[in-house]
Amino acid sequence: MSSTLSPLPYTDTKPHGHADFYFAINATFRFILKRFGLDTLRRYWSDMGTNYHKPVSERWRSGGLPAVAAHWRAFFEAEPGAEVEVITTPDEVRLEVRTCPMIRHLREHGREIVPCLCQHCYYVSEATAAPAGLTVRLSGGNGSCTQRFVKQSANEPGQQLDHIKEAA
């Protein structure tokens, strides 16, 4: 599928990703955390959102919340084991993640999960959303969460990291 037909700016033609990639993600996060610390891991996540996901930011900036919703619907459709509802209103896109595909796969295979794993969704998404004039708020975690994508506003309280559960 070409990137012009898909809400995802990738050229991969597989209908689904391979869940074993989650092992590599978890191991990478663990390595950075142990070797360089939490602040460096958070910068890594933010850099991923700013740089790697720049094409996503550009689509969100030009397409607004409908582009955000289309992105997440296509993204989770390709994620093996995901159970996610994408809810749209005029003011926000809300992801109701009933089953996080990464945590599910890691648990099914007895892997030790990096406790701060769920924070990566906030840091990556916030850095992706900011250039599009959006912000993200996340609550829950450890296998299920709610992620809200809204327009940046002085009325939106900042993300409280203690609202993001540690993974186990």
Image (cartoon, grey):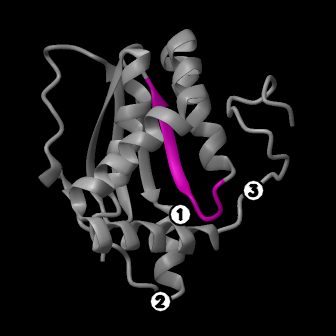
Q: Residue at x 65, y 62 (%)?
A: 80
User: Magenta region: which residues?
Assistant: 79-88
Q: Main secondary structure of the magenta part?
A: strand
Q: Residue at x 68, y 29 (%)?
A: 7
Q: Residue at coordinates 49% horizontally, 77% vertically from top-left? A: 106
The residue pinned by badge 2 equals: 110
Q: Residue furthest bottom?
A: 110
Kind of element beneath mark 1: helix
Question: In the rendered structure, which amino acid carries the disc numbered 1?
Answer: Pro
Upstream in the sequence, badge 2 or badge 1?
Answer: 1
Is 158 drawn above or below residue 100 in the view shown? Answer: above
Given residues 16 and 120, the one toward you in this image is: 120
Earlier in the chain: of badge 3 and badge 1, it is 3
Q: Return the residue at label 3.
A: 16
**Disc marking residue 101:** 1
Residue 42 against residue 86 in the figure, above or below: below
Q: Are marks 3 and 1 in contact (CB under 8 Å)?
A: no
In front of the other: 32 or 163: 32
Q: Is residue 73 magenta?
A: no
Is the Cβ of the residue at disc 3 closer than 8 Å to that at disc 2?
Answer: no
Q: Residues within 10 Å of mark 1 (few under 14, many from 20)?
A: many
Q: Is residue 80 above or below residue 96?
A: below
Image quarter of the C terminus: bottom left
State if disc 1 and disc 2 touch (CB < 8 Å): no
